[in-house]
Image: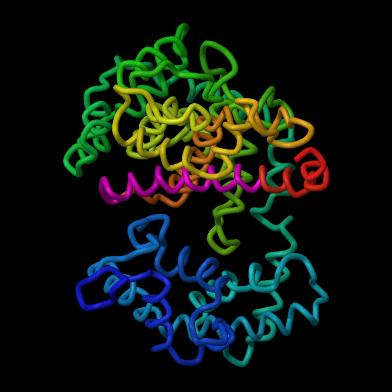
C-alpha cells in the first residue's frame, strides 16, 4: 500500500506516527515507540478518538482526510495523555500497596488514569491518596451508584411497588402509531446521507418497535420485513410471544433472554458497566432514565437509534451464512453483509460438515450448529447492546457512513465470536479429529 500524500494509509501507522510526537507517555508505549495495544483499546479509541461516535476513524485503512482528523484529535489531547501516563504510575504503586489483584492492571488502570487526568490534570502532592481513593471506589463497587445499591434499591418493597406501577404507566402511555416504512425502505435501498437524515428524524423506528406490543404485532413485523428484505423473518429473539410483554423490574423475574423483555435491573447493570464511577448519576436517576427508555420503541429512547435497530431487524433475515449467498431480490447491503460472513473459513467448514463431506467435530455439537444457524439473532442482540450504550451516552451516528460502519462492525464482531467458538471446539477435539481423518 502506498503512503504518498493524499492516499490511504493503515490506521495503525497513522496512530504510531502521531503518538511518537508525544513525549512523556513511555509507560503507555510499546518498545517501538507506538502506543500499546491496550492503550489503543482502553484509552485512545474509547476516550480520545471516541470511535463509538466516530466509527469512520476506527476503520483499518484511512484516507488523507480521516488520517488528518485522527492525528489532530490525538495531538490535541497531548497534555491529558501525559497526565494519564503519570497517573498510571501512581495507580500501579497504590494497587500494589492496597494488594488489589483483580483484573489486568492495564485494563483496569488505563481508563482510570485517564479519568484522573481529566479531573485533576497532572498528579500533584496528593496524588498517592487520590489514586488510592480512586482504586477503592472502583473495586468497591457497592458504592453510591454501584450494583449492590441498585440491587438493594430495587429489592426494597416500597420502591419495588412504586417503580413497577410507574413502569406499567409509562408502558401504557406509549400509543401504537400507524406504520410508515417509506423512510426505512428508502434508506435500505440507497444508504445515502439524505435518506439517513429523513429516517433519523422520523418516528419510523419507534413505530416499528411499538407495533410489536399489540396483538398480532410479531406477524405484522414479519410482513414488513418481508416487504423490505424480500425474506420472511425468522425468530429474531425480540420477544417470547406474539406481542412484547412489559419487562419485569427485577432480574429474578425474567422469563427468558429475549431482547425487548430484559428486566430494568439488567439494563441498568449494563449502564453501570459503561459509565465511569465519577460520571454515574444516583442510582434512582439511572433507574428512572431506564424506565423511560424501556417504554420507548425497541427499548431505545433516541429515535435515530431506534431507526438503526429497525434497520438491523430488516437486514437480519438475510444473514444466513450457512446457506451461502443471499437469494435474488435481497437488498444489496444485506447481500454484502451476508457474503462477508459466508466466505469465512469456519463457515465453509461448517457447510461442508452439514453436507456430510467432513465432520465439524467428531461429536457434533448441536449448540454450536444452532449458533451458526441463528446468526441473525446473535447479530441483533449485539447490535441492540451497542445501541443501548449509545443511548446511555447520548451518542448518535453522524451520517450514513457511520450507520453502515456500525452495522458492518457488529456483523464482523458477531462472526469473530462464533469463529472463536468453532476454533475452541476443534482444538479441544483435535485428537479425535485426527483419529477419524
- Give the camera-side residue of 243 and 127: 243
User: Measured from the top left, where is residue 10 in percent x and y?
Assistant: 37, 70
Q: Is residue 25 above or below residue 428?
A: below
User: Residue placed at 36% from the left, 37% from the top?
Assistant: 308
- Give the camera-side residue of 125 and 409: 409
- Give the camera-side residue of 310 and 353: 353
User: Residue placed at 68% from the left, 86% from the top?
Assistant: 128
- Give the camera-side residue of 33 and 170: 33
Q: Which residues are magenta?
A: 398-421
Q: Quadrant of the N terminus?
A: bottom left
Residue at far left of view: 194
Horizontal relation, residue 221 to residue 269: left or right = left
User: Measured from the top left, where is residue 196 in percent x and y?
Assistant: 24, 39
User: Residue placed at 42% from the left, 35% from the top?
Assistant: 338
Q: Which secondary structure type mostly characterizes the magenta part of the structure?
A: helix
Horizontal relation, residue 348 to residue 91: left or right = left
Q: Is residue 385 above or below residue 275?
A: above
Give the quarter of the image for residue 154.
top right
Q: Quadrant of the C terminus?
A: top right
Q: Is residue 134 above or below residue 250?
A: below
Q: Is residue 296 visible?
A: no
355 drawn magenta: no
User: Measured from the top left, where is residue 30 in percent x and y?
Assistant: 56, 83
Amino acid at each position: 500500500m502506498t503512503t504518498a500524500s493524499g492516499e490511504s494509509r493503515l490506521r495503525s501507522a497513522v496512530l504510531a506516527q502521531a503518538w511518537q510526537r508525544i513525549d512523556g507517555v513511555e509507560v503507555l508505549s510499546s518498545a517501538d515507540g507506538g502506543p500499546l495495544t491496550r492503550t489503543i483499546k482502553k484509552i485512545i479509541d474509547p476516550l480520545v478518538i471516541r470511535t463509538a461516535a466516530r466509527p469512520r476513524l476506527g476503520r483499518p485503512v484511512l484516507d488523507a482526510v480521516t488520517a488528518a482528523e485522527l492525528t489532530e484529535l490525538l495531538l490535541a489531547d497531548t497534555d491529558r495523555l501525559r497526565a494519564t501516563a503519570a497517573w498510571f504510575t501512581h495507580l500501579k504503586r497504590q494497587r500494589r500497596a492496597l494488594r488489589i489483584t483483580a483484573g489486568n492492571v492495564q485494563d483496569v488502570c488505563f481508563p482510570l488514569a485517564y479519568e484522573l487526568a481529566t479531573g485533576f490534570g497532572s498528579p500533584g502532592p496528593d496524588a498517592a491518596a487520590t489514586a488510592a481513593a480512586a482504586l477503592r471506589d472502583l473495586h468497591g463497587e457497592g458504592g453510591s451508584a454501584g450494583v449492590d445499591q441498585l440491587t438493594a434499591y430495587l429489592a426494597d418493597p416500597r420502591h419495588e411497588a412504586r417503580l413497577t406501577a410507574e413502569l406499567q404507566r409509562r408502558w401504557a402511555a406509549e400509543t401504537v402509531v400507524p406504520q410508515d416504512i417509506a423512510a426505512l425502505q428508502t434508506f435500505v435501498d440507497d444508504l445515502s446521507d439524505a435518506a439517513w437524515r429523513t429516517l433519523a428524524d422520523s418516528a419510523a423506528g419507534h413505530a416499528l418497535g411499538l407495533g410489536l406490543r399489540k396483538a398480532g404485532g410479531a406477524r405484522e413485523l414479519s410482513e414488513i420485513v418481508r416487504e423490505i428484505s424480500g425474506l420472511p423473518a425468522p425468530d429474531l429473539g425480540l420477544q417470547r410471544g406474539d406481542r412484547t410483554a412489559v419487562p419485569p423490574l427485577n432480574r429474578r423475574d425474567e422469563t427468558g433472554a429475549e431482547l425487548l423483555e430484559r428486566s430494568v435491573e439488567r439494563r441498568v447493570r449494563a449502564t453501570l458497566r459503561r459509565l465511569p464511577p465519577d460520571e454515574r448519576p444516583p442510582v434512582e436517576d439511572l433507574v428512572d432514565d431506564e424506565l423511560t427508555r424501556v417504554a420507548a420503541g425497541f427499548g431505545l429512547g433516541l429515535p435515530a437509534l431506534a431507526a438503526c435497530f429497525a434497520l438491523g431487524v430488516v437486514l437480519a433475515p438475510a444473514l444466513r451464512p450457512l446457506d451461502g449467498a443471499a437469494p435474488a431480490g435481497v437488498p444489496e447491503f444485506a447481500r454484502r453483509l451476508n457474503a462477508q460472513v459466508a466466505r469465512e473459513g469456519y463457515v465453509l467448514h461448517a457447510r461442508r460438515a452439514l453436507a456430510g463431506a467432513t465432520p465439524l467435530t467428531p461429536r457434533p455439537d448441536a449448540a454450536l450448529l444452532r449458533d451458526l444457524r441463528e446468526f441473525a439473532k446473535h447479530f441483533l442482540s449485539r447490535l441492540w447492546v451497542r445501541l443501548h450504550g449509545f443511548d446511555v451516552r447520548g451518542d448518535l451516528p453522524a451520517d450514513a457512513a457511520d450507520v453502515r460502519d456500525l452495522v458492518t462492525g457488529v456483523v464482523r464482531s458477531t462472526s469473530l465470536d462464533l469463529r472463536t467458538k468453532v476454533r475452541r471446539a476443534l482444538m479441544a477435539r483435535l485428537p479425535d479429529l485426527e483419529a477419524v481423518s
